[in-house]
Amino acid sequence: MNQRFQNAEIKLISEQYAENELYKAVNTIGIQLENELKEFGLCPEECFMETLELLSEIADNGEEILPEIENFWLRKENEYRRYDRQVSDNEIRKSVGIVFGFAILAINSSRHGFYQYTLPEQLMQMVATHKFDGWQTTLDRIFSIPLPDGWFDAFIDEEPQDDGGLADFAKNVNALSKQMPVTVQFVSNQYNSSCQQFMGKMENPRFIAPKQDEAV
């Protein structure tokens, strides 16, 4: 992200992805989440594009993404921090954590075991490691938003959808990112090992609800 979205860029994103299910999900509580961050907050369109960047890396790398999860988190913290080094560590972590939360929501829609269980667990552990004030409540709010089953599978396969097709969606990601790079102000990589206390056993995380009727 090189700069914050201006009004024209926000309008372009909102119009182009108005029918996209992930954008709708982000937009459901995106304005409230932005308002809660008094020093800095991603607008829904910025949050959507940041989430999309992470999902694109996941789609490109598959299981090989696992050792890169921490690097992605730290890269985002460092990237955001450059814009305003006065922003609090808590707001930095919360903004990154929100992006991770929406990414978890998206990949958990998959019917494949790695994306439905293994990767969400690892992303959840990363959020817990860098926890922010109210992180449990914030993630709970994100995970309560419905997203159609199989959304992430369609994203990977670039299967057509009613919004014009995820093929076009994926093709436009890089172009839009170059036109409208998002800027945030994030800082710190404070380690905290309380993930187990909140999530319980990692094979049955509280936020990831297994789909009983789907084959893993």
Image (tube, helix red, strand yellow):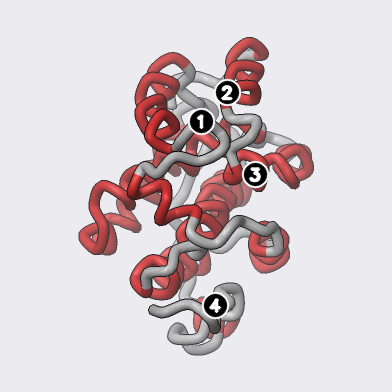
What residue sits right under mark 1 in the picture? 164
Can residue 126 be seen in the rendering of this structure? Answer: no
Q: Secondary structure at mark 4?
A: loop
Total marks shown come to: 4
The amino acid on which the numbered mark 1 sits, given as a three-letter code, is: Gly
Image depth: mark 3 or mark 1 in front: 1
Q: Residue furthest top?
A: 8
Q: CA distance from mark 4 to mark 1?
A: 27 Å
| Apparent side of residue 197 relative to residue 82 in the rendered image (left or right) | right
Do the residues under discs 3 and 2 have CB atoms within 8 angstroms?
A: no
What residue sits right under mark 4 in the picture? 211
Q: Residues within 10 Å of mark 4 (few under 14, many from 20)?
A: some
Say which residue appears at 44% left-offset and 54% top-offset. 152
Say which residue appears at 59% left-offset and 57% top-offset. 148
What residue sits right under mark 3 in the picture? 26
Position of 59 relative to 4 (above/below) = below
